[in-house]
Image (spheres, helix red, strand yellow):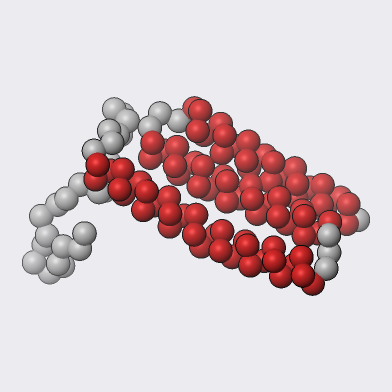
Amino acid sequence: MREYITAFLLVFGTLGMLLAGLGMVRLPDLFMRMQATAKAATIGLGGLLGGAMVAMWSRNVVALVLLTLIFTFAIIPVAAQLIARAAFRMGVPLWERTRENDLIRKKPSRSRPFID
């Protein structure tokens, strides 16, 4: 039974990484590419590490994998958001069919101060 769970998690992780790679190739601008790779790579890494954890079941491996997953799920989305914000401020162009841009500076309202 453990072999089936390991195989499922490894295939799931591999498909996540494949989606991240396809997102890098297919999506039109930097911001969409970063969003796709951050999500898919995080899920893919979670599947691969989960498969490794099930395959090599021991306290040390479980502890290391869980710590790695916690830090991965905490750091990758934040890093992608910070890199995208820096790219936006540097003037990296958006895709021409982008409809909404939530990062454009707007005039602050009196009820809510402007926070950059």
Nearest the viewer among 31 and 99 is 31
Whether residue 82 is visible here, answered yes or no, is: yes
Number of numbered labels in the structure image: 0
* Residue at the image point whose x is 50% and y is 33% from the top: 24
Nearest the viewer among 43 and 57 is 57
Q: Height in image: 83 above or below 112?
A: above
* Image coords of residue 72 (percent x, y): 56, 59
Q: Height in image: 21 above or below 47?
A: above
Residue sticking out furthest to the right: 1
Q: Height in image: 8 above or below 70?
A: above
Which quadrant does the N terminus fall into?
A: bottom right
Q: In which quarter of the image is residue 60?
A: bottom right
* Image coords of residue 34 (percent x, y): 44, 42
* Image coords of residue 62 (percent x, y): 75, 67
- In the displayed structure, does residue 77 sit left or right of residue 46? left
* Residue at the image point whose x is 43% and y is 50% from the top: 80
- In the displayed structure, does residue 12 sit left or right of residue 92? right
Which quadrant does the C terminus fall into?
A: bottom left
- In the displayed structure, does residue 99 sit left or right of residue 105? right
Whether residue 101 is visible here, answered yes or no, is: no
* Image coords of residue 20 (percent x, y): 56, 38
* Residue at the image point whose x is 51% and y is 28% from the top: 25
Q: Height in image: 2 above or below 66?
A: above
Q: Quadrant of residue 55?
A: bottom right
